[in-house]
Image (tube, helix red, strand yellow):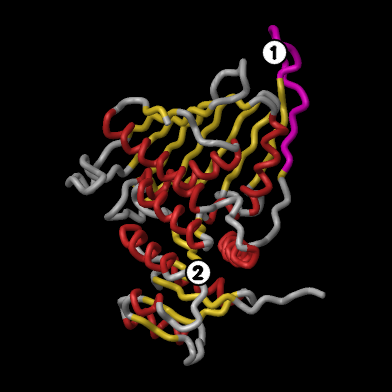
Amino acid sequence: MTTHLPPLNLAIFGLGRWGTHLLRNFLRLPGANVVALVDPHPQRLWESRDRFQLHDTVTCYGTWQPAIAHPGLDAVVIATPAETHYPIIDAALGAGLHVLSEKPLTLESSTSAALCQLAQTQGRQLMVDHTYLFHAAVQQGQPLCSQIGTLRYGYAARTNLGPVRPDADVFWDLAIHDVSILNYWVGHMPTAVEAWGPVWLQSQPQDRFPFGLRDAGWLRLIYATEPGHPALEVVVQVSWANPDRQRRLALVGDRGTLVFDEGSPANPLTLYRGEFQTQALPFLPTAIEAENIAIAPTEPLQAMCQHFLDGVAANRPSPISSGAMATDLIKLMEAIATAADTGQRVEI
């Protein structure tokens, strides 16, 4: 006999652009029951109630502290500014609630690690919304990496004209997406990083950004490979000051190249096959072909939300985007910041 678990009672904390998307998706999933909304702006609360035709049983709160004590609450979904994540998540886990947080988990690896330990102690699930990891192209691309042979190098570009953030630079805002995808495809963290980039718009020093907020940046990520093979190096370019919109990432091997290109929504994942026929002049290319990989028409955010519900139901950490994975990623972002500030390669 199949046991049907009751829907998970959720509270959504933060109803900005991303919080509204999270609310929309959880309302569509039968395994979720949104019972509370939290936002300091009353207009957002009422607009959300009207837009989604929410019942009066959904309680609205102006602050997060009383929402954590909402009767029957099972889990909270955090879509508030990053600097508020630690105290909210700490309180929620302490109250015995499961937590799904918008990325980054926190702004310091030490506080993220503390939250992971608390989740483990409390026997609760802590997951982070790295939505790209649930994109069908990223999911289907990971096993295809083995088909391009020995990895030689990679490249990525993520550029657009805005939006410009006032609280984080382009590395934390944009590069974190490509880094998380690369780590997922390669299967591990890089061993060293180099980073550099200019500041044009916001040069005043800020906490964690002593030289201001970089508007464009370049990363070199160095990944260890199999013994006897050179390291895999990937160069990532990011900018919010470039009207040429790009969302493209590629890994190159000795037998082909795997490309994830959001600029081609009809065919976002392509496997280019080809290699040299001989290992001496004239190095003739052979077996050249391009295969557009069929992608399931699912919304990545909805897949992420369902993954969270499934993880809570099974009470097991996410194998894709757990708090521990997010903590390792924050350690890497801290190393990138140090490399950009000092101009030196940083070993991980």
**Residue sitting nearer the eye, 190 or 281:** 190
Tell me: residue 87, above or below residue 215: below
Q: As drawn, is 35 to the left or to the right of 138?
A: left
The image's mark for residue 22 is 2
Quadrant where the C terminus lies?
top left
Q: Which mark is residue 283?
A: 1
In the image, is 200 to the left or to the right of 50? Answer: left
Q: Residues within 10 Å of mark 1 (few under 14, many from 20)?
A: few
Q: Secondary structure at mark 1?
A: loop
Q: Which of disc 2 and disc 1 is earlier in sequence?
A: 2
Check disc 2 and report its element: helix, strand or loop: helix
Q: Position of residue 116 (x, y in %)?
A: 46, 53
Residue 159: x percent and y percent? 43, 45
Whether pointer 1 and pointer 2 mark residues with C-beta atoms closer than 8 Å, the reply is no
Mark pair 1, 2: CA separation: 51 Å
Task: Point out the stretch of residues depicted in magenta.
Answer: 276-291
Furthest toward the left, the residue is 204
Q: Amino acid at mark 1?
A: Phe
